[in-house]
């Protein structure tokens, strides 16, 4: 008989999608962002404050059901992009209005420093592309 601490955590379907039982806010899709980028299991475990048993169970579930999980993950990404585009369009005028506002008094030096940093980053990116 195995002790409860070595039992595989259940992967359950909630209104948020495939979730690690007992971790209501963490879906397998959250983990997939890091799995697909090749992050080590230990990094993912620490990032989400999972136990070794939880990360092992989640990764085993993903591997055993890869086609299903990846299809749902692609759908989650698609819906997230659609929402981002919707809200960007909804707020386009507000963003433009905010961007056109002059800096608050006393923040000019900070804004100038930010502009200089952005210019330096742009210069380095151009050099890397050449």
Image: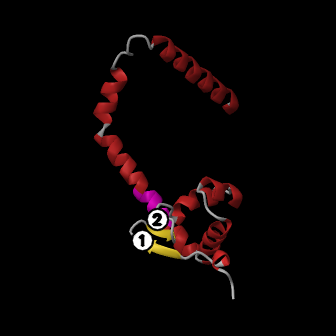
Residue 118 at x, y percent in the picture: 56, 23
Q: Quadrant of the N terminus?
A: bottom right
Q: How is the image coloured?
A: secondary structure
Identify the residue under disc 1: 14
Secondary structure beneath dot 1 equals: strand
Instruction: Reply above or below: 45 against 11.
Output: above
**Contact, mark 2 vs mark 1 (Cβ under 8 Å):** yes
In front of the other: 109 or 80: 109
Q: Is 84 within the magenta?
A: no
- Residue drawn at 47 percent across, 58 percent down: 77
Q: Quadrant of the C terminus?
A: top right
Identify the residue under disc 2: 24
Occupied quadrant, residue 8: bottom right
Which residues, given as a range, are shown in magenta?
A: 73-79
In front of the other: 34 or 68: 34
Q: Is 75 within the magenta?
A: yes
Task: Mark 2: give few (<14), some (14-19) or many (20+) Cα within 10 Å.
Answer: few
- Residue drawn at 50 percent across, 16 percent down: 110
Task: Mark 1: give few (<14), some (14-19) or many (20+) Cα within 10 Å.
Answer: few
Indicate which label's residue lies in the foreground, 2 or 1.
Answer: 2
Residue 121 at x, y percent in the picture: 61, 26
Residue 105 at x, y percent in the picture: 38, 11
* In this rendering, position of residue 22 left or right of residue 130: left
- Residue drawn at 50 percent across, 64 percent down: 27
Residue 45 at x, y percent in the picture: 64, 59
Instruction: Reply above or below: 67 against 87.
Output: below
């Amino acid at each position: 008989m195995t002790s409860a601490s070595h039992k595989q955590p259940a992967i359950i379907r909630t209104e948020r999608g495939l979730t690690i039982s007992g971790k209501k806010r963490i879906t397998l899709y959250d983990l997939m962002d890091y799995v697909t980028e090749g992050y080590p299991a230990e990094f993912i475990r620490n990032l989400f404050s999972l136990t070794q048993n939880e990360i092992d169970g989640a990764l085993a579930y993903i591997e055993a059901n890869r086609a299903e999980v990846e299809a749902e993950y692609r759908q989650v990404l698609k819906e997230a992009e659609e929402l981002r585009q919707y809200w960007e369009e909804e707020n386009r005028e507000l963003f433009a209005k905010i961007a056109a506002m002059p800096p608050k008094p006393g923040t000019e030096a900070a804004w100038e420093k930010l502009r200089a940093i952005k210019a330096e980053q742009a210069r380095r990116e151009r050099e890397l592309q050449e």
